Image (cartoon, helix red, strand yellow):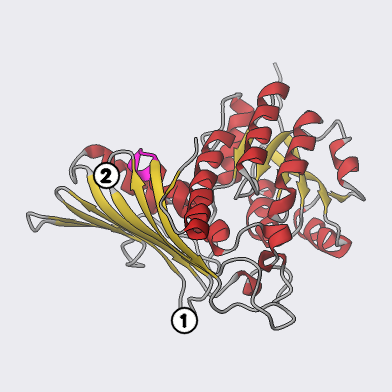
Amino acid sequence: MAKAKKKVLRFGILGAGSIAIYRHAPEIATHPNAEIAAIYDPITERAEDLADEFGGDVYDSVEEVLGDDSIDAVVVATPNAYHCPLTVAALKAGKDVLCEKPMATSLKDAKKMIQTAKQTGRKLMIGHNQRLMSPHVKAKEILESGVLGRVLTFRTSFGHGGPEMWSQDQGPHTWFFKKEEAFVGSMGDLGVHKTDLVRWLLADEVKEAAAFVETLEKTNEKGKLITVDDNAVCILKMKSGAVGQLTASWTYKSAEDNTTTLYCENGMMVLGANPDYPVEVMLASGEEALYKVGAIATNDVQVRSGVPDLFIDSLLNDTDPEISGAEGYKALAIVVACLESADTGTVAKVKS
């Protein structure tokens, strides 16, 4: 008897920018059960370049991609303002959707995406990759072992020189700097990674936020300050009572910072500070443990994110994605609370 042929999922990619180039396209193209079937970008040359490198056909419109019944799933890798309308359209067209973060530009739109996925019976996953990085997976394992006791306070930071160096736009005209397309700046680009990471690591929810969300330096192509934030410093209070600091920045000039420190009842754990041992555990007893468990990805050094792999696994096994729309909503809700706090000068409650 001949062996059953493995199912190969056919993907459409909407948006051929840097996140598609460095994450989605290469990881889908090298998965044994997936292939890139269609690519659309309003800048056709970008779609053509992506297709030349990773396969797939260049389509002339979103409608053409969504109207192709042979396509199983769609990656939404566009500027933030288009996440909701494209995701909703794709779900209604019968496609499962992997959407980049932040999942939407409002909590109302995020709820609409979740509701549409439920109504259509399709799967929705949000591309938060920090919880999948091997140092963070190891840290979660250590926390769950109980050796450190409960987390009392924490610091987490994500900062680099700015998206204009990484974006396909390559300059101050990038969509990341435009409120109408991005909605939020460093807090949505980088801070949302850490809001997802903190709540996942601590197995806890953020209850309240107090934040300064500022535009300190970045200028657009006209030499004027950009219309979104380039720095955010936030204090988060968890439902458990733990408190901590989250920093997001586009003005770290010399080196990227993607680190987290957890101060616990029985010691502390440092993540991402030591390139040789990205997980460091120091107990109050004086005992130390160093773990060499792979790298934390940076813009300069990309490692396989695991995001498309996780999404593909959920489709093949017909299981709910771990990083579901509901998870994306909770990360976004913390960002929104930080923006509210900065606007009002008060402590803001995180909306459920």
Can you see residue 332?
yes
Residue identifier under label 1: 254
Residue found at x 76% / y 48%: 13
Q: Residue 185 in the image: x percent, y percent?
A: 59, 63
Residue found at x 35% / y 38%: 203
Callout 2 crowding tier (Cα within 10 Å): few <14, some 14–19, many ≥20: some
Res. 87 mark: none
Image-quadrant location for residue 218: bottom right
Q: Residue 132 in the image: x percent, y percent?
A: 47, 47
Look at label 2 and name its amino acid: Ile
Question: Left or right of 183: which side holds 243?
Answer: left
Q: Residue 187 in the image: x percent, y percent?
A: 53, 60
Label total for image: 2
Residue found at x 64% / y 38%: 108
Q: Residue 324 in the image: x percent, y percent?
A: 56, 35
Query: Does 21 appear in magenta?
Result: no
Residue identifier under label 2: 142
Label 1: element kind? loop
Question: Left or right of 242: which side holds 85?
Answer: right
Callout 1 crowding tier (Cα within 10 Å): few <14, some 14–19, many ≥20: few
Residue with the most extreme left position = 285
Label 2: element kind? helix
Image-quadrant location for residue 98: top right
Q: Quadrant of the N terminus?
A: top right
Among the two numbered marks 1 and 2 on one chain, the one whose residue lies closer to the N terminus: 2
Look at label 1 and name its amino acid: Ser
Residue found at x 71% / y 42%: 84
Magenta part of the chain: 200-205
